[in-house]
Amino acid sequence: PLMMIEQNLPSMLAQRLRIHPYARRRDNLEYSTASGITEILNSPLMTSWRKLADSVDDPDSECTIAMVGKYCDQGDAYLSVVKALTHSAIATKQRLRIEWIVASDLAAGDDEEVSEQTSKEAWEKLSKCDGIVVPGGFGTRGFEGKIAAIKYARESGTPFLGICLGMQAAVIEYCRSVLGRSRANSSEFVGGLEPDVEDAVIFMPEGDRERMGGTMRLGARETILKEGSVAHRVYGTDKVMERHRHRYEVNPAIVPDLEAAGLCFVGRNTDESGERMEVIELDETVHPYFVAAQFHPEFTSRPEKPNPLFLGLLQASKTKAAAVTDKKRCGCVILSKNSGWKTNPYSTLEGFNYFQKALDIRECSSRALDHLHGN
């Protein structure tokens, strides 16, 4: 659009169609309802578009998001998720780089076809990412790898967003790691689970096990968000409408145990079938951004209006990336009176806490080092 405006296309169109200000005949004036088309460059619409274009052309930084899925070889399998990430990257002025990680590569012991070297390389790639997305999917292949990635995100403080099956995997991981229920799983994949203890994910009560066609929970559904939650903050409202596509859901019977252990269920949908768990998260005092949703937030994301859950992920990832850059910049070398020169970014940052108010932590000036070592 900006290139077309620079080449005077709006005026050319207005003249060709004989609309304002080129409507010369009296009767044409009646139909010339458009106004200001030749001054469109300074309109609010184009001002917003120019801002968006500038974010794409001149980003502040770069962030790497890991996409942990099972369809990584299919270029368009996660296209909606990629677009949603791109929208939020533009809004936060970041250059987006997606690291595709095959989920099964993260669990070499559960897949005989995955070598130890392949698994090691996958984990190395995951550890270098600024954020992690576990999207939806079907089937058991790669499921344990998704759980492993979620556990890493939770324990390392890496920003995380789970979608549909990604939320279910996050609940199962929490049951295993925090509640100590090692056999916790989804009844979609494993049978013989202890009811309301190990069956963290169950078949929806109103579903039909015999007939697969047309039995999914589809379309836009209302979700009520808990005030004060991360999800409520990023959405900025109490209720949201998001699109669904699933047959299984989190077992409501285990929710009290999970909440008592620190996993917050902040989005719920109450309908004729009972209370459904829609959004989970960890408190911001525990984790910078750990959010997962049963619905598909990528379907409502647009370039000029990114979905809030993706926007929150990219904002948290930008903060993480900046923190890593600061550590590298400030933790080059420190002088120790007893042990000589050492490379230790954590010790450097810890020492700098004493005089952050006086100096920018990123400057690493000689005065800061002199203060640190009492010179």
Image (spheres, grey):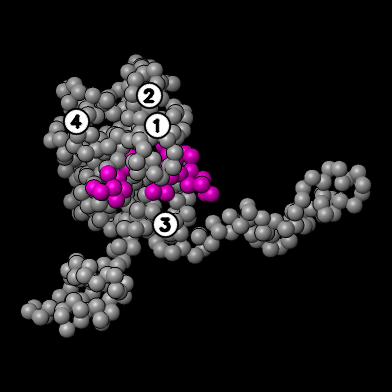
In this rendered view, identify the residue nearer to me: 78 or 1: 1
Q: Nearer the viewer, mark 1 or mark 3?
A: 1
Q: Do labels 2 and 4 touch, CB within 8 Å?
A: no
Q: Quadrant of the N terminus?
A: bottom right
Between the C-alphas of marks 3 and 4, the distance is 38 Å
Q: Tell me if residue 363 comes above or below residue 209 in the rendering.
A: below
Q: Indicate yes or no whether the magenta region holds residue 305.
A: yes
Q: State the separation of the CA atoms marked 3 and 2.
A: 37 Å
Q: CA distance from mark 2 to mark 4?
A: 20 Å
Nearer-N-terminus badge (3/2): 3
The residue where tag 3 is placed is 96
Where disc 3 sits, the SS reads: strand
Q: Residue furthest front?
A: 357
Mark 3 or mark 4, whichever is nearer to me = 4
Circle 4 sits in a helix, a strand or a loop, which is it? Answer: helix
Q: Nearer the viewer, residue 250 or 145?
A: 250
Q: Secondary structure at mark 1?
A: strand
Q: Give the spatial CA distance, label 1 vs label 2.
A: 8 Å
User: Dot 4: within a 10 Å radius of its alpha carbon, few (fewer than 14), some, or many (20 or more) residues?
Assistant: few
Please state if 326 lies on the left or on the right of 371 as rendered: right
Amino acid type, label 4: Asp
Stretch in magenta: 283-312
Label 2 belongs to which residue? 270
Q: Identity of the amino acid at label 2?
A: Thr
**The one of 82 and 59 positioned closer to us in this rendering:** 59
Q: Which residue in the structure is indicated by mark 1?
A: 224
